[in-house]
Image (cartoon, rainbow, N blue to C red):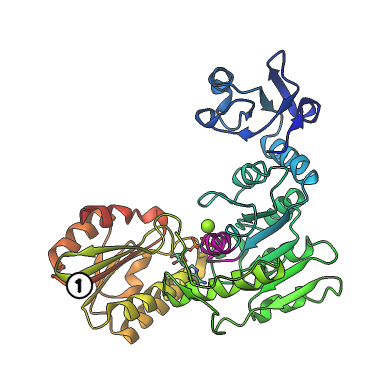
Amino acid sequence: MIPLELSVIEPLGRVIARPWADVVTGMQVDSRRIEEGDLFVAVGGGEDFVQHALARGASAALVPADAFAALAAIAGAVRERSSARVVGITGSTGKTSTKDILHALCAPHRRTIANEGNYNTEVGVPLTICRIEEDTEICISELAMRGAGQIAWLTSFVRPNVGVITNIGPAHLEFLGSLENIAKAKAELIEALPPGGIAVVPPEPLLEPYLERSDIVVKRVDPTAPLPFATSYSAAHQLVNTRMAVAVAECLDVPLPEGVLNVEFSKHREEERDLPGGGLLLNDCYNANPVSMRAALEHLAARANGRRRVAVLGDMRELGPEGPAYHAEIGELVRALGIEHVIAVGELARGYGGDWVATATEAAAELVRVLEPGDVVLVKGSLAVGLKAVAENLGD
Ligand SMILES: Nc1ncnc2c1ncn2[C@@H]1O[C@H](COP(=O)(O)OP(=O)(O)O)[C@@H](O)[C@H]1O
Ligand SMILES: [Mg+2]
């Protein structure tokens, strides 16, 4: 982190500092991650860990008056002192993947940082910004959007030069009410761009009203354009994400790969594992909404290559009153693709058709019962359904 004087921290709450400390050189909210010279910010129940943080070498600890405001102020002070180009990524699906791809494109050529895993909230985003060093050239940060105003808050201290919206879909619909409102909330990222900033967007009519600003550059990315390099992955939706990332890399003057682009995706997305008899497990149990469910089923169909397909599909949560209709649509897709065996898990999942079970535990047992050597299995559902257990039950 670019060092900050304690005078920046002191107005934000109660500060416990070592007598010799005048600056802090990193920020953590988990005392186990503290390194020499860091600032420990006690959020949630963190106050109990102040002594632990100081014992690990923290220069100071802050018990903030308002945790989110303090984290934002600290991140804002770091951002203000940095000349890095900052890329903010939001969208209903594909934020983390697009971040991982963009990081893989930039890191060989520029001093680049990107958020860890899925860090994308009022806590995770400041942690990312506070990893910016004096010589950081590019900072990539995913920005969550679960309601109106969240992106405006995050961008107030991220101050992105480039804003990426991966897509607009019915994720967290119950909090926003309509797709139009989802587009509006995501467009807070476009509003936050400075004059001369760059918006990288898909051809999405719902976003057009927000792209009329004449003082920014708008890049509309064709999701089907050919890629000028090969990739270590093949899923169609990841190639779409790659085109978005390439558009950003081009804006940042980062040269594109000459050989194959290798990307290591974050955990529980697109994990592939061999199953007995030439079978394959596609473990994608981290989350699900109608956009990603559709992409995953199409990927299953393409990846199976003639093998029998089994889909263990959990509820897609947080869709509000439209939930049952979206589940019924996925049911239609399952039939159109001719998926041979479906295990539907959870109340809403009844809409998929196939065999129905109430819980992930039952789904795990049912899968073991129906699985045949050589099957290709997709496991996908909202995190709360707990389908991780289904994949784990198949062993390593
Ligand atoms: N462009 C896309 N279109 C549809 N589904 C996608 C897309 N990108 C990723 N996915 C799928 O959506 C899920 C979440 O992906 P992730 O990259 O973690 O997105 P986010 O960070 O927005 O939640 C995964 O199942 C992934 O395979
Ligand atoms: Mg994410």
Q: Quadrant of residue 282?
A: bottom left
Task: Answer with left or right where residue 310 lies relative to residue 271.
Answer: left
Residue 100 within the magenta-colored segment of the rendering: yes
Q: Is residue 296 left or right of residue 114?
A: left
Question: Disc 1 marks which amino acid?
Answer: Asp
Viewer-closest of 34 and 2: 2
Q: Which residue appears at 15% of the width and 65% of the height? A: 276
Can residue 359 be seen by looking at this rendering? no
Report the residue that reaches farthest toward the front: 258
Q: How many marks?
A: 1
Magenta range: 91-105
| Residue for badge 1 | 375
> Which residue is at 64% across, 81% downward?
203
Residue located at (50% from left, 51% from top):
117
> What is the x, y in percent for residue 340?
23, 79
Q: Quadrant of residue 6?
A: top right
Magenta highlight on residue 11: no
